[in-house]
Image (cartoon, rainbow, N blue to C red):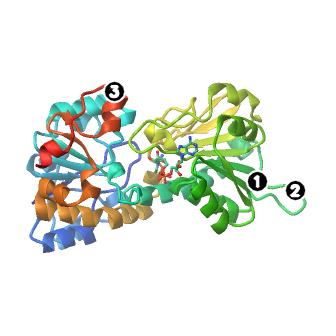
Amino acid sequence: MIIGVPKEIKNNENRVALTPAGTQELVKRGHTVYVQTTAGSGSGFQDDEYQKAGATLLPTAADVFAKAEMIMKVKEPVEQEYKLIRKDQLVFTYFHFASYEPLAKAMLESGAICLAYETVERADGSLPLLVPMSEVAGRMSIQEGAKYLEKPLKGRGILLGGVPGVKPAKVLVLGGGVVGTNAAKIAAGMGADVTIVDLNLTRLRYLDDVMPKNVHTLVSNDYTIREEVKDSDLIIGGVLVPGAKAPKLITRDMLKTMRPGTVLVDVAVDQGGCIETCRPTTHEDPTFIIDEVVHYCVANMPGAVPYTSTLALTNATLPYAIRLANQGWKKACQESQELRLGLNVIQGQVVYKAVADAFNLPYTDVSNYLA
Ligand SMILES: NC(=O)c1ccc[n+]([C@@H]2O[C@H](COP(=O)([O-])OP(=O)(O)OC[C@H]3O[C@@H](n4cnc5c(N)ncnc54)[C@H](O)[C@@H]3O)[C@@H](O)[C@H]2O)c1
């Protein structure tokens, strides 16, 4: 198969979808890999390393899109890329369709096959291509939250871990999945007083078992969250309903009950956010303030630590990419239930129920394409 890796162009996005090591694995199996020049440089991988691994460099994204049967990206295509994607081309990347209708419409019009990293799902319900980035974003959410709690950055001026004789900060983590667990682990390690809320009691039991003593668990409901936000210093949004828009657990009216300088980090912003007042921000201008509450809502948090993120992402995507390249998308998705669940859009039809529901679009069962 001919695989194309364009350079990411979203604001401050320095990740790349394939490393030189991944390139070598694909080339070794007889595939052709085209990489846009400097695509890996933001992550510390230089053009000559890709060439040594067997890739051919192309100067522009248009060249890469024109040649490739499968495009591997990191972030969802942005407007300049819409017109480069063509009928029957396989695009393997994060899409987060439910949070942005123009993207869904553009991909439907393109006639491409959109296989979304975030909905590839194992039999146990885990999301293997979301996990590595959630690990990064969860850990980073505390690093960023701690920074914005500093007074010069408009926070409450509280040190996360406190000091002997002074209480630590209170961290509320919404969602005890991968983001939430990684956030809680780092916050607890820094000495904060941490509470995780989740709907899933089994998950809370597990977290109660494995987390240190300064992590508490609570069942998620509106009443409890209303009470908790009043004296929390840092609130992390990490809930997910796979493929759907995130539920709004923090509503506008709750902001007035929070202390001035409270920091909200809505990691779930890429699925529409679980904090009503959040809107996507960028690494260049990551925060805004409403009712004296600091909002940090960067939609591509792992983009700020591209070295770690690129390696973590490609560790997870490569086995799937090899399978798609070896077998073609149809056969690979016939044989792999995990990959089949990644199919969101096929040749102008939505084949993922939650995406169709989000925009009232007609839904077609994926089996119609795989028979
Ligand atoms: N902003 C970024 O850069 C970035 C990076 C990585 C992941 N994310 C996003 O972070 C979000 C969380 O990802 P994850 O991997 O942790 O998902 P996950 O599936 O591992 O965890 C989500 C958790 O939310 C819980 N949940 C669902 N509804 C809830 C509710 N009403 N109240 C409390 N808990 C509820 C689930 O039970 C689950 O435990 C996703 O939207 C993901 O796309 C964003």
Query: Residue shown at 36%/55% (left/top)?
Result: 15
Image position, residue 285 (x, y; %): 52, 38
**Residue labelled 1 has its Cβ within 8 Å of some atom of ligand 1:** no
Drawn side of residue 16 relative to residue 256, left or right: left
Describe the element under mark 2 as helix, strand or loop: loop
Name the secondary structure under disc 3.
helix
For the residue pair 100 and 53, the one nearer the viewer reads as 100
To which quarter of the image does residue 354 belong? top left
- Packing grade of label 3 (10 A; few <14, some 14-19, many >=20) is some
- Residue 18 in the image, given as x and y percentages of width and height: 27, 62
Disc number lying in front (3 or 2)? 3
Quadrant position of residue 288: top right
* Residue wearing tag 2: 166
**Residue marked by disc 3:** 359
Q: Is residue 34 above or below residue 238?
A: below
Q: Are marks 2 and 1 in contact (CB under 8 Å)?
A: yes
Judge whether residue 62 can be spotted in this image.
no
Mark 3 vs 1: CB contact within 8 A: no
**Mark 3 or mark 1: which is in front?**
3
Dot 1: what SS?
loop
